[in-house]
Amino acid sequence: MDFEAIPGVGAKTADALAELDDSVDALETGDVATLARAPSISEGRAAAIARAAIRIRHDDPGGFLATDRSRELYRDVLSLLQARAVTTYAEKRLETLYPSATASRIEEVREFTARAMEREPTAEVRDALAGVEPLSTPRDVAVRDRCLATTDAERYAEARGKIPELPVEVVEDARELAELARGYSTVVALDESFTGVTVEGDVRVEPDALETPAELVPERPLAFFAENRKTLLAAVEVHQVTEMQAPLDTETLESALARVTADGSVTGDDELARLTDAIADLDAAISMAENVANDRLRDAIRERDVTIEGSDLLSLVERGAGVDSLLSRELADEYDAAIEAAREHLVETLALDSGETEIARQAFPDEPSFPVEHDESVIARLREQLEAEKSRREERHKRDLARTLADERESAEELVRAALELDVELAVSRFSRDFDCVLPEFDSDLNGFEIVGGRSPMLDVEFSAVEPVDYGVSGVALLSGVNSGGKTSTLDLVALIVILAHMGLPVPAESVRLRRFAELHYHGKTQGTLDAGAFESTLREFASLADGEAGRLVLVDELESITEPGASAKIIAGILEELGERDVTGVFVSHLADEIRDVADEAVAVDGIEAKGLVDGELVVERSPVKDHLARSTPELIVEKLADAGESGFYERLLEKFD
Ligand SMILES: Nc1ncnc2c1ncn2[C@@H]1O[C@H](COP(=O)(O)OP(=O)(O)OP(=O)(O)O)[C@@H](O)[C@H]1O
């Protein structure tokens, strides 16, 4: 794949992507976690690359979010979704969902969404997902207790290339092979010529061994399962609690994984456990056995009255004969019993088998001496024997396990991928459930949007307290209304729903119909009057807005705050006229609806968020804008209230000015 064809991917990034085994697949599926494993590619960049690759696939020019405010809202939407993901993978993967004007992309995500909305995000599955992580590549395996042997230089090179995990040795003859067998628990001879040769130790002649590397180094296929054991088990659990169809037999995988430890060794075999314990306890057991013998002998000596004949004493003194000879004469039986107790202690503590017992018994000398000391070379031999037995047994188990698991790697990868993808679906499902969402309906006959019962999850009130808003606009409209009536919140709601709809996601409303927009231009409220320079550049921005392509949705919040009210009304009227002539949908929030209507050449639609009245000094607002209705302003409402109270004729006369 030509990575450089992806917009924003230069030669360096393309090289980094090429270093990944599965970058093509990751780009195809939007697997941001995998892409971010490429050298020097951050997660944010990986998400941008994945989005760019998706855009190429859909021939999508991008740029739907045309202003800072619309981009800001998109980030907010994304955060709401990401907060509902369990795994980091899903969080990153959600970043590949972006608002698009391209039908095929929207449709692709809508199919995913329809599936996602069916999913039940139970606490059980979320708990199971907490243990699932993207699979990691196992570190290189190095085996030290097994080696390959050959007499042939070419064969040597081939073995080094094919089996880098094992040491490969060149030998001249059977004698050197035997020597090698003393240093390794298993030697695999690769030459036919060794067939029939008998040497001591575990030496196998296998001329075809290089053809079956997994038999030679079962550690190779096992390393993947060992490294990813926890994730694989969690992925199995995810499949079990959701009753999702698994791509492999989960019971077989579970019982195989129960025999692998995270560091790649095998467990679950009593004999192996015995050998492992014996090796670990050997030093402690030998010194305990020594103590047993010495304690017994010490007691025996202490209790004994020794009568020594003069000639013996003379011989001891003159010839420097050791006390040992006296010991052997006087305490031979006690010594034998003490040594027997020490040997038994060693054999029993380490649970040695008969072959090992034979070696272990030699650790204590038959010749009496005090204090009793073990023979370290015998213990070294015993240790070697135990370690060799352990290695061979372990290798056999690993080979068994490798046979069970080797062909399951792809299915295991699929198992984890499915669990991680489920988390992406569950995040969408939770979002949809938390905010009572529906899938919106795209309708090419509309020149705007129709929202019924829309509730924004981004307000500064609890979602349960958010009042539903019905609002629809076809063409261009002004939105008037009382202060704090919810005009900005309505624009936010429209933008939020439009962004979600163009991402292919469900929207927080009872129902939504809308046209597919080309771009979203949302201009938030400007803070205060602009100086001449800033005013000029804002005006330039709006000129390009008026000239831009068809099919846009333009949302503008109180543009009048950029300059004095009279000039603002004229500017807004001018922009509305331009937009009205093009195929653009627009909502302009303004307190100057009356003034704008006065200076506009064409009729301007005005909707209004109306206050139903004042209760305890608080406005009671009907949040859904009333169509074709200029809402009364807050001052007007207050004057009206005072006039109704009949306190002074002044209020009645003042009220007339508002008509
Ligand atoms: N649909 C709604 N449900 C519940 N509360 C809402 C809703 N819409 C708005 N509000 C509340 O009203 C407050 C004011 O809303 P908003 O800022 O949108 O009003 P505004 O009409 O734009 O005000 P201004 O004229 O001062 O710009 C919000 O902070 C929110 O607490």
Image (cartoon, grey):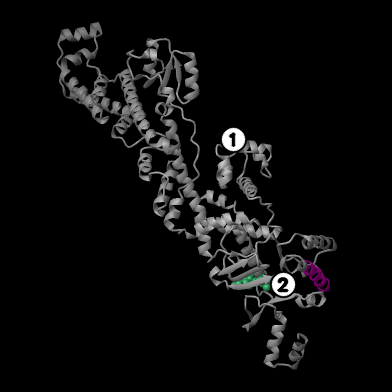
Q: Give the amino acid at mark 1.
A: Glu
Magenta span contains residue 573: yes
Residue nearest the observer in this picture, 283 or 618:
618
Q: Nearer the viewer, mark 2 or mark 1?
A: 2
Percent position of residue 589, x then y: 72, 71
Stretch of the chain drawn in magenta: 563-578
Judged left or right of residue 613, residue 369 is left
Residue at the location (42% across, 28% down)?
217
Q: Which residue is mark 1?
A: 19
Quadrant of ligand 1: it is: bottom right
Residue nearest the observer in this picture, 130 or 440:
440
Quarter of the figure that contains the C terminus: bottom right
Q: Which residue is mark 2?
A: 477
Residue 537: mark in rendering: none
Percent position of residue 324, x then y: 23, 14
Q: Residue furthest right?
A: 532
Residue nearest the observer in this picture, 377 or 625:
625
Q: Is residue 31 visible?
A: no
Above/below status of 48 relative to 334: below
Above/below status of 536 relative to 653: above
Tell me whether circle 2 and circle 1 mark residues in contact (CB < 8 Å): no
Magenta span contains residue 414: no
* Magenta stretch secondary structure, dominant: helix
Percent position of residue 149, x then y: 42, 17
- Some atom of ligand 1 lies within 8 Å of the CB belonging to the residue at label 2: no
Q: Give the amino acid at mark 2.
A: Ala
